[in-house]
Image (spheres, grey):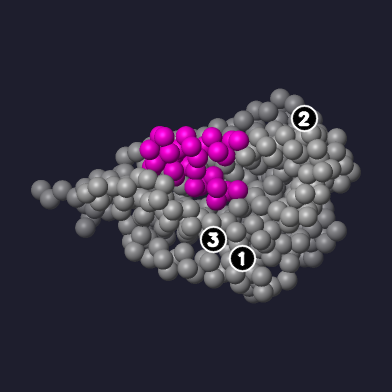
Amino acid sequence: MESIVKRNLRDLDYVLIGVMLCISIFSCIAIYTSTYGKANPATGNALLGIPPHILYRQIVWEVLSYGAMFLMMVVDYKSLAKWKWWFYGLTMLMLLAVFGFHTVNGAHSWIPLPGLSFQPSELAKVAVIIWTADYMAKMNEREVPDYSFKALLPIFVVFAVPFALILKEPALGQALVLLAILYTMLLVYVKRKHLQVILIGTVAFLLVVFLAVGVFPNQTIRVLDHQHILKPYQTQRLISFIDPGYQPLKSGYQVLEAEIAVGSGGVYGTGLLRGSQTAGSWVPFQWTDFIFSAIAEQLGFLGSSVLIMLFLIMLYRMIKIATSALDDFASYAIAGSVGMFAFQIFENIGMNLVISPATGITLPFVSYGGSSLIVNFISIGIVLSVSIRRRTLRFD
């Protein structure tokens, strides 16, 4: 028993844990500086949307998240596959339950609990990763694996249900993350010819959407509103991305102010608590979706590059663990998590730089929020569980 514990500790990815600790430090600094002096510690600031004791809350969530991460690390990741249907079903019930509660910022995305609120769409991402990873692994174990589009149908159905429910909330950003997870897992699973068909179809669809929005913005808004495909504010955000001057005081205001904050940071940054955009609260809800603009303004290109480098190291360590895993289930599960994090990081930083549309996606491990933080660390915990079980037992 002692030898097993020593082996597990030896195989534990300490670099990944160290990177997560560094990212958490970035998170606390950014949340502190983007809310400093703007809210009464006891009551918060209702006008700016700042919760009371926001930094202390984040620290508590960080502690709980690390606890969840180490708990998942101890659990054998293979046991997750046995409970995939229970996990998936419970998550779908919670996605339905959100419609029974009041809206928050115009969306049915939260389940209120004593002292906190939980966002089931965060948990749905892990649920579909586990289900899909097990399905793909079991398909590979068959004597004659079937990689046809017909065999992929159950995967599309499993993704379609939470995608539709999350889109209905509405939470377009979270729905897009599900698509990123699906595409990443298909990338490492399906045959190349099938993947090419899927990618070509998707690229063609996106081109049509962007061309329609760019050339005929007013007509596109009317069509999308009439067909109830997107909410008006979602359509306006898309148009503001293509035309930054579109509604600069409405849908484009937050994006433009974040861009100014990033640009004003320069190479070395303005210094903590010295950024005019951050200190002056010019970027609404900066501690959530636009937390990167606070980092870029105060720490500059160098500081924000350090954060991006930490993210790249995190993804690299995850991929390295996936490629050395003993079974396909572990590899596919980590691939889904890599796709989830990579898309969220690119999309969030991109919308701060106005190179991607604003979709309400938070920056993983950095933005304020309990649900996303705990679920993200649970995903890292699963990765660490794989890392300490990459060797087969040997009896000497």
> Relative to residue 365, is residue 72 drawn left or right?
left
Neighbourhood count class around disc 2 (C-alpha, 10 Å): few under 14, some 14–19, many 20 upward: some
Question: Which residue appears at 59% of the width and 41% of the height?
Answer: 345
- Do we see residue 85 in this rendering? yes
- Give the residue number, with chain letter if any, for mark 1: 118
> Relative to residue 309, is residue 115 drawn left or right?
right
- Give the residue number, with chain letter if any, for mark 3: 161
Please tell me whether mark 2 sits on a helix, a strand or a loop. Answer: helix
- Give the residue number, with chain letter if any, for mark 2: 263
| Circles 2 and 3 in contact, beta carbons < 8 Å | no
Closest to the observer: 261 or 173?
A: 173
**Vertical arrangement, residue 348 with respect to residue 136, above or below:** above
Closest to the observer: 200 or 251?
A: 200
**Vertical arrangement, residue 257 with respect to residue 144, above or below:** above
User: Where does the image place residue 179, in percent across and percent down from the top left?
Assistant: 55, 47
Taking the magenta stretch, the answer to whether it contains residue 179 is yes
Look at label 2 and name its amino acid: Gly
Question: Which residue appears at 27% of the width and 53% of the height?
Answer: 5
Closest to the observer: 10 or 214?
A: 214
User: Where does the image place residue 329, in percent across and percent down from the top left?
Assistant: 34, 50
> Relative to residue 29, is residue 253 drawn left or right?
right
Q: CA distance from mark 1 to mark 3?
A: 20 Å
